[in-house]
Amino acid sequence: MAAMLAERAPLPRFFSRGALALVLGLYTIYTLGPFLWLATMSVRTTAEISADHYAWPKVFHWEQFRIAWVDSDFATYFWNSTIVVVGAVAVVTLLGAAAAHALARYRFRGNRLVYGILFSSIIFPPQITLISLYQILVDYNLYNSLLGLTLVYVSLQLPLTIYLLEGFFARIPQDLFDAAKIDGYGDLEIFRRIVLPIGMPAIATTLILNFIQLWNEFLFAVVLITDPDKRTLPVGIRAFMGDHFQDIGMIATGVMISVIPVIIVYVFFSEKLIRGMTAGAIK
Amino acid sequence: MAVVTLDKLSKQYGPTGPVVVDKVDLHIGDGEFMVLLGPSGCGKSTTLRMIAGLEEISSGKLSIGDRVVNQVPAKDRDIAMVFQSYALYPHMSVADNLAFGLRRRNFAAAEIERRVQDAANILGLTPLLTRKPSALSGGQRQRVALGRAMVREPMVFLFDEPLSNLDAALRVNTRSEIIKQHKRLGSTMIYVTHDQVEAMTMGTRICVMNAGRVAQIGAPLDVYWEPADTFVARFLGSPPMNLATAVVASANESSVARSQSLETALTRWSPQLLGKLVDQKVTIGVRAEDLHINKAALGSEPAGHVRGRTIAVEPLGAETLLLVEIEPDVEWTARLPRHVPVAIDETVDLYFPVNAVFVFDATTGRAVIGEKRRDIGQ
């Protein structure tokens, strides 16, 4: 049987590999194309873009980045986004991991109830909370503040984070915890020295997902922030779209600026992300 | 001084839940190798986990050394445990796995280094110290787990089926490794297993458990030769002891047990003892190795016999197992020499020395204790 397969393998394998390469190639063009187009637009002026949408830049207007960063307050937007997103992701990751560990490891009354409530909150679209969140933030004087937006982001991403991490943590064998207990470690230390390192692939996964999700988040930011000084990047980019005039070149530049951190985070954590997705990391 | 004493130790899950360990009394002497033996679900692992402090004690008293430790957390009981799954920390190197427990206890770095090196030397782990557990074979992992317990130099070692995940050859190896370490360290060790061979070969004493209770405690051969009840009789020995119901009849001086297919004299029991059992049903037990197809093999020894229909012949090479149905739904197994001159579905007579007969109460299963067997040399 094995010999037969080996004899017959080369031709179908050639085709299946070829087909796979073709699909991946097409998909890469499909996803990378718009990105490259955007990249070319980011170094062209709006006038040039209007003249010919798809043309290769004749002159590379790198000063567009300086204009966006300095003259158009992108530095502020970038800084606001960084504060809100890094803060929210940090809190979500720590709180989420701790909660997931507790739900996965400790038997206590209401464990599954809490888990069920968290899980059910994933099902509903977050937009339905928009109006009530707005009112709550107003009541607590958190409306139009970066802290308020950060808290909202934490609450938005926490359930899914806990859900993903709980699934991963629950598969860490109980014996490891027992062994650590006998080795003399307390609950918090076991969390820090056993759960966090072993769960790192899963934690990195949620970290990237949360970062990208929140970095691009627009709806809550545009509703909950009115002050131009407190705009995050997606809202800031939106400001270039006037009612009568759209500064496409500047929008493209802004988007390029906003994409850079996502790429950095992804490159930094992607190895762990892949390990987390392929799971089986324990053993 | 590491005497471990279990005084009516019980475990019940919830106030109305099942009682998985039921008033276990056990005294384990200093330096003893005590094996907790029983089928899965008999409560042996739960008992061990209560000793370890990983499971709360529902009632009863547990002492290690001179101290009652019911309320003492696992880390302060001065014990080390080896798990069936090895439970090595996957993100740490072998050296870090070994040192993890010592670091927590604030040993000096030099002392940790010395202990880790010693343990690695003894267990042949030195070339593996920088590896992660995932790069080790099963046997190597189990040796690391053993080393992690050894470096702690605890009062008591606990083993929870440590060999179950190893293949047969490694199991024998690791078994002798553990025995060797027990001799070297002289520490008290408590070892849980469902494998009777491990129990027989490793234990100073074994404690057979059944359904949460202690069925019998004793030296391995004592338990083998004087099982306290039919459960122990069948659990120790492979194939298990053959059992059949018979009626005691008084025949002149000595008593006889008889059924349709079986007849044997009962010579190891006094007439007074058997007097109460006359005309009563009892359970007769004979071990597979005591059955012979050739009466001449017993020489002048008085013999009992059993008649049945052969249902299977299983040649194992060194020996042959003969399965005989002596009554509907009662099968006996004989462990015979290589060549067995019988065909399937044939009526055969099997003979056994009357000295090798066991008698159990037919209703409770408790052994009726007689004189010791003459042929076991004790």
Image: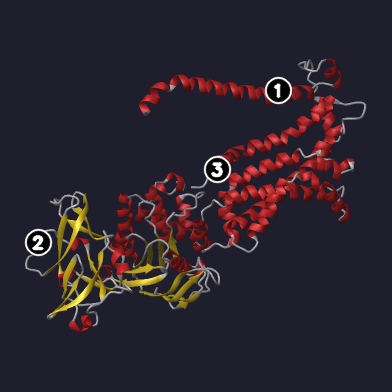
| Residue drawn at 64 percent across, 24 percent down | A28
- Name the image quarter holding residue B373: bottom left
Q: Is mark 3 on a helix, strand or loop?
A: loop
Tell me the chain of label 3.
Answer: A
Residue B376 position, x and y percent, is: 17, 69
* Badges 2 and 1, same chain: no
Q: Which mark is residue B11?
A: none
Q: What element carries label 1?
A: helix
Which residue is outermost to the bottom? Answer: B272
Residue A196 position, x and y percent, is: 59, 51
- Position above or below: B325 against A16: below
- At label 1, which amino acid type do we have? Gly
Who is closer to the viewer here, B175 or A90? Answer: B175
Tell me the chain of label 2.
Answer: B
Numbered-mark total? 3
Q: Is mark 2 on a helix, strand or loop?
A: helix
Kindly indicate whether the residue at mark 2 contacts the one at mark 3 (C-beta within 8 angstroms): no
Between circles 2 and 1, the one closer to the viewer is 2
